[in-house]
Amino acid sequence: MANWREHVRKVTPYVPGFQPKEAGVIKLNTNENPYPPAPGVCEALRGFDAGALRKYPDPTASVLVDALASYHGLPPDRVFVGVGSDDVLAMAFMTFFDGGAPILFPDVTYSFYPVWAGLFGIPYRTVPVGEGFVVRAGDYVGSGAGPADGNCRACGGIVLPNPNAPSGLALPASDIEKIAAGNPGCVVIIDEAYIDFGGETCLPLLGKYDNLLVVRTYSKSRSLAGLRIGYALGCADLIRAMNDVKFSYNSYTLNTPTILAGAKALEDEAYFCSTLQKIVETREAAKRELAGLGFSFPDSAANFIFATHDRVSAPEIYARLRDRGIYVRHFTSPGIDNHLRITVGTDGEMAALYGALEGILG
Ligand code: PMP
């Protein structure tokens, strides 16, 4: 007897960070921004006429696309928007990775990449990071990227976060250029989710490399994880190809208030820079505090620190922090299972973290 269960797509889903329901916890587990969105965004959302929701949103989200284009000094046909950068990245995987040669990404990186590859049937190869989680650009170029396929491509595409997650380590733009220049036959996606907190953006390379796609998010530096806005910048042909796939899948992705608030968020550069500066200062102080408590970690350029303790195991610290109402992220994958990814919160939240750690570590 036929059983529909045998024909269900089998996937191993991504596991998002825990979102505790109880009030009053300190949440340092999903790299959210501890500061509120720009005041203008809150005002725009409060002033939004809910009656307008009767109509579908603009499927091209042109108010947001135009605002992003002008913010980055690019024409609007070089901007793609989506429901968080997860949506944008998934769309890019679907559009550019055709299942021929395997795509490459580091073995320690954003754990959604292998999930999309699995979902879309894209073969992939992980490239081992070096000592201290360092990504070596040379491993993604020429023979380092693997044997050439029938199209003389060493690989079917590359996806790399810069700064990387969960290490927080950033590559210089010159390394990104090496990778883009060394792989003209495939698309190189640079996931700049955390770039505003430190690393050197590769956006200036867009004029030179038509195979380079840069993906950004509003979830971290712009304090809008709950609104879900991500975008990609690249040459007009890349963006057109992504829109063709998007309009073959779901035309109405971003909703009307999100489109308006997303454009509004770009207007207050002073607020944006002031929250970024606070987070960077708190992160640098956190490096000193955590080192003093016996932790070691890569030198993060992001809004989190990936730390391991010299005496007490990560799962134990994780559980004992959680018992005290402090949530950090613990990954169970081999090689990183004795590390904790700690999001940089406010100075007050971090002080509570250090106090709790002192108690736990004795
Ligand atoms: N890229 C990286 C490297 C991330 O850590 C995250 C956050 N989970 C994302 C993309 C996705 O973020 P969002 O969908 O909220 O834009």
Image: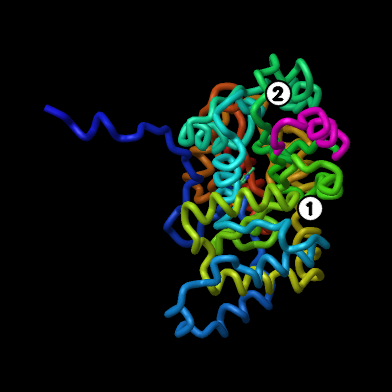
Magenta highlight on residue 186: yes
Question: Callout 2, which amino acid?
Answer: Arg
Q: Residue at x 69, y 43 (%)?
A: 191
- Marks 2 and 1 sit apart, C-alpha to C-alpha, by 40 Å
Magenta highlight on residue 204: no
Question: Callout 1, which amino acid?
Answer: Val
Foreground pick, 83 / 221: 83
- The kind of secondary structure element at disc 1 is helix
**Magenta stretch prevailing secondary structure:** helix
Is 122 located above or below residue 162 in the figure? above
- The kind of secondary structure element at disc 2 is loop
- Residue 284 x %, y %: 80, 47
Q: Which residue is mark 2?
A: 153
Foreground pick, 314 / 128: 128
Foreground pick, 345 / 75: 75
Q: Which residues are magenta?
A: 173-188
Q: How is the image coloured?
A: rainbow
Q: Residue 254 occupies which quadrant of the picture? A: bottom right
Q: Quadrant of the N terminus?
A: top left
- Say whether residue 240 is left or right of residue 13: right
Say whether disc 2 or disc 1 marks the residue closer to the N-terminus: 2
Q: Is mark 2 within 8 Å of ligand 1?
A: no
Is 309 located above or below residue 243 in the figure? above
| Residue 362 in view | no
Is 143 located above or below residue 159 in the figure? above
Q: Marks 2 and 1: which is nearer the front?
A: 2
Q: Which residue is mark 1?
A: 280
| Residue 204 in view | yes
- Residue 271 x %, y %: 77, 70
